[in-house]
Image (spheres, grey):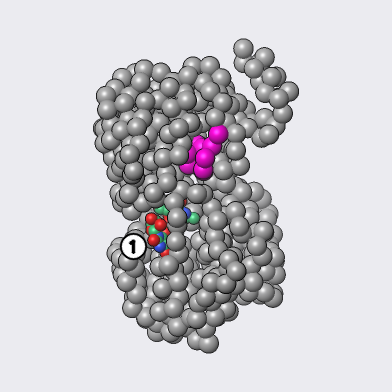
Amino acid sequence: MEQYIMKGGNPLAGEVVISGAKNAALGILAASIMTDDDVVIENLPDVSDTNALIDAICHLGASVVRPDRHTVKINAKNIHAITVEDEDMRKMRASYYLIGALLGKYKSAEVPLPGGCTIGSRPIDQHIKGFRALGADVSIVRGAVFAHAIDLVASHIYLDVVSVGATINIMMAATMAEGETIIENVAKEPHVVDVANFLNSMGANIRGAGTDVIRIRGVRRLHGTTYSIIPDQIEAGTFMCAAAVTRGDITVKNVIPKHMEAISAKLREMGCEVVEFDEEIRVVGKPKQRHMNFKTLPYPGFPTDMQPQMTVALSLAEGTSVVTESIFENRFKYVAELSRMGANIQVEGSVAIVDGVEKLTGAQIEAPDLRAGAALVLAGLAAEGYTTIDEIGFVERGYENFEGKLRGLGANIERVDSEKEAKKFRLRVG
Ligand code: UD1
């Protein structure tokens, strides 16, 4: 029964160092198997999603050395399989990146259909459309994607929806296709740019990442590299929201402020003080914070992965806010849990109407998915009394040492796995 137990009420204050970006790491780890040389990846977040992908890469036959928690050295020279095992991958979304990586290098991939958070139907039709345009024969049989090609050839691909996953996946496969591939209407998220930079550091020829059009001139081989992953935009945003939710004063360190603009702007609109430095941002929450409206959009719009955390902040702001979720259709599941803590939120389809309340009260709740789980932790840290959160495996997929970092900011929180430990926590905290 692993769970977080916390006693709310402490404004969080201090400094927190942000880890490497999970979503960039997933693309980069997959892409690292596209060369026979050594690849060293630094600033790797130590979270269960990246560790699951590293296990899968090992099972394919690559040699993996972990000199420390945040560094991995991968050599894929001895890869002997193009089939990814089921158990490795069912639980996570980013297994699909192994399709693009294997198809690019070995022209063949067999990968179970991705699982991940149930925040929507999450089809992969755009990925498949891209692979087919590059000349691959793609079929879905018994829950797995089979992609095979004799040769991959460049193509002109227009994505019907702006998709992070499809952009990265097609970019990887096209890196080793013959000729110049053009992908239009691509995602511009920082992690798309990071994966492109990583591939370029291996000798790929990718231009335009971070704009609407990516051009890839295929190369025959990629070489080894040493690469450091960018900071995690969503982890940083979560701690910035923690300052707003708990009326605290938090400095997030090791961030790229440019990536945080949408979040900084919205926190300012609520009345928080947000000060940007070269590689850090300080957020000071205010006793009275105002309502505002926001809508999730592809980057540089407001990230869907920050929607629950910001909604928790709004649930404690003055007035009525309107939150529109335009990326995933099932991303308000946490609202039921938050309501049990006293929040006043009505959900109608893709819109949540948030009537701010004076306070939240502790409750026994469950994390419905990764980001919502983190948001509920923030709610518990602001709430009166004790909160316990079950299903924290979701949170651990994407946040490294979440409870430790929160404790460093003064939170009363612990990860426990028995009723006895929970009792001990209550006795200690009082
Ligand atoms: C990635 C992130 C996830 C984030 C999301 C949006 C990773 C591992 N996950 O997920 O944390 O919430 O971007 O920023 O990086 N779609 C299709 N067909 C496709 C692909 C996507 O219709 O082939 C739709 C999706 O259902 C969704 C939208 O496009 O409505 C965006 O999805 P996408 O950007 O692909 O999300 P993921 O890559 O799955």
Secondary structure at badge 1 equals loop
Residue closest to the eye, 314 or 219: 314
Q: Which residues are magenta?
A: 366-374
Q: Position of residue 170 (x, y in %)?
A: 44, 71
Ligand 1 resides in the quarter of the picture at bottom left
Q: Is residue 369 magenta?
A: yes
What residue do we see at 37% from left, 34% from top?
A: 311
Residue at figure coordinates x 45%, y 75% from the top left: 131
Is 381 positioned to the left or the right of 388 in the image? Answer: left
Q: In the depicted view, which residue is nearer to us: 395 or 276?
A: 395
Q: Is residue 408 above or below residue 115?
A: above
Q: How far across and how far down the image is residue 113, in percent?
A: 55, 63
Q: Is 109 displayed left or right of 9 in the figure?
A: right
Residue at the far bottom: name it: 150
Is residue 28 visible from the viewing direction of this image? no
Residue 281 in the image: above or below residue 385: below
Distance from mark 1 CB to nearest ligand 1 atom below 8 Å? yes
In the rendered view of the protein, which quadrant contains the C terminus?
Answer: top right
Spot occupied by residue 85 in the image (x, y as percentages of width and height): 66, 65
Q: Residue at x 57, y 78 (%)?
A: 108
Tell me the residue that label 1 is attached to: 161
Dot 1: within a 10 Å radius of its alpha carbon, few (fewer than 14), some, or many (20 or more) residues? few
Q: Residue 71: x, y in percent?
A: 61, 54
At 67% from the left edge and 23% from the top edge, which residue is drawn? 422
Image quadrant of residue 102? bottom right
Q: Amino acid at mark 1?
A: Val
Image quadrant assignment for residue 395: top right
